[in-house]
Structure formats: structure tokens, C-alpha cells
Image: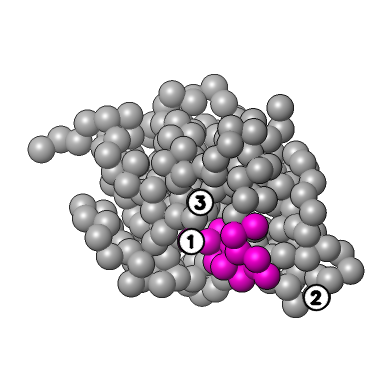
Amino acid sequence: MARTGRLAGKRILITAAGQGIGRATAIACAAEGAHVIATDVNPALLAGLDGMETRAFDVTSQEAIDALAAEVGALDGLFNCAGVVHNGNVLEIADKDWDFAFDLNVKAMMRTIRALLPGMLERAKETGAVSVVNMASMASSIKGFANRTAYGASKAAVIGLTKAIAADFVKQGLRCNAVCPGTVDTPSLRGRIASAADPVQAEKDFIARQPMGRLATVEDIAPMVVYLLSDDSRFVSGQALSVDGGVTI
């Protein structure tokens, strides 16, 4: 049976698809008719993603990136969702944490795009358009937050990377955009709340910075990614689109 939906006929690869925003987006893309290649460093987390192609993928390994690029071939869409959040101000951040934040949040993204882009550009010759979506954050060049030195700096770099790629390849049919979520109720956030000295107060503080009075759900963010991967956003490129519940009003 032919697939139908806004992403029908499109092959889309998603990193960190095992949980959180990555998983919600994989499910949403599949519901819109995409052939989804869902990847995660922990393949056990990919269980239950029925009807999708799943595979283990460590985005920090150049060898793994090269192997993936050789195996998956040309793609219509790529969602770089993998990332990490470090806590601490500039006096507290350790060099190893700074380096890891940039290795995972920026360098891994750059390497993945670099490896998959040639195939995507070939695909664009056939279809006229392909799309890359990068996970950034409202905590970036958009807005500063306390105790997010490494995270904010690395996510600001993601926005710069996104704009550079968009500018370089706009005439070849590639669109590249970044999604900048607010505070999202994910396993990552729950881990940060649990590790706080006062978890109850920590959760209240996270909610308090959202003008809408609640945390975002992963289902609040996935539709923006679907939109950017679809032809509905065919005239959108080089943008950092906030889905932040009004934090940056």
C-alpha cells in the first residue's frame, strides 16, 4: 500500500530516536508517511518503533558515521537530535565537560551532515529539495540561562552551523533549519530534576520560567520538525525557530 501524508515518499534519518523529542518525531514522521531510519546509541531504546528501520548509531564515532552514510544512501531529510545538557557556570565547568558538550552537540552534528550531505544533494537533483533540521535550544544565542555555560555556547554554535550550511547550499536544493525548544519534559530533564538538591523545587523552577505555566511535551516539539522536513516549509531555510512556550516574548 502506498504511503500517504506530508512526508510520503521521503526517507528521513533521525538521531537519538530512542526517547524524548527524537522518538516523538520519529513516530510523527512515520505517521506522515515517511520511511524513517531511527537511530540511537542505545539500540534497546528503539524497541517498539514498529514499521521503522532501526539501527544502533554512535554519533561521536567518525567510523560509525562513515559506515552509516555508506549504508543508508540518499536521504530526503535528516534530523540531528542527539545532544547533552551540562549544568554549571563558567567558573564551574570542567574542560572535559566543555569538550564533550561541543563534541556531541556540535562536532558530531557537523560530521554527520558532512557525511550524509553528498547523497542528499544528489537526491535534491531528483526531487528539487532536501531538508536538514538541527536541534538547538532557546538557551543559545537567543537567550542566556543561568548555569548553562557549555550548553548555551554549544547550542549557539549549532545555530551558526545551521545558517552557514543553509547559505552554502541553498542554490542546490538544500534547506537547513534549527529548532529551539523551551523546557521540555523529557527523560533528560527528569534526570536533571532528580539530581537536584531539592527535586520538588527544581521542577517548580523549570515550570516557572515557562509563561504558559507548564513544561512542553515532546508532542509540542515534533510537529515543528515535521513541518521543517516537509514541503510545507519549502521557502524556509537558515532559520532558528523557537518553540518555547513564550519564554522569549
Dot 3 falls on a residue whose secondary structure is loop
Q: Is residue 241 visible?
A: no
Q: Are marks 3 and 1 in contact (CB under 8 Å)?
A: no
Q: Position of residue 47 (x, y in %)?
A: 27, 65
Residue segment shown in magenta: 187-201
Q: What is the CA distance from the residue labelled 2 to the residue labelled 3?
A: 26 Å
Q: Position of residue 13 (x, y in %)?
A: 40, 52
Kindly identify the residue that appears in the image at 21 percent across and 52 percent down.
51
Q: Residue at x 27, y 57 (%)?
A: 49
Mark 1 neighbour density, 10 Å: few (under 14) some (14–19) many (20 or more): few
- Is the C-beta separation of discs 2 and 1 under 8 Å? no
Q: Residue at x 46, y 44 (%)?
A: 217
From the image, give the main secondary structure of the stretch colored magenta: helix
Q: Nearer the viewer, mark 2 or mark 3?
A: 3
Question: Residue at image x 61%, y 45%?
Answer: 207
Q: How many marks?
A: 3
Mark 1 secondary-structure assignment: helix
Q: Which mark is residue 187?
A: 1
Q: In front: 134, or 28?
A: 28
Q: Which residue is mark 3?
A: 185
Residue 210 showing in the rendered view: yes
Image quarter for residue 2? Answer: top left
Label located before the other in sequence (2 or 3): 2
Specify the label residue 175 is tagged with: none
Q: What residue did someone put label 2 on?
A: 94
Mark 2–mark 1 Cα distance, whole angstroms, equals 24 Å
- Quarter-wise, where is residue 219 in the image? top left
Instruction: Point out the tag, 2 or 1, that comes first from the N-terminus.
Output: 2
Q: Is residue 66 above or below residue 231?
A: below
Q: Give the image's coloring scheme.
A: one colour
Q: Amino acid at mark 2?
A: Ala
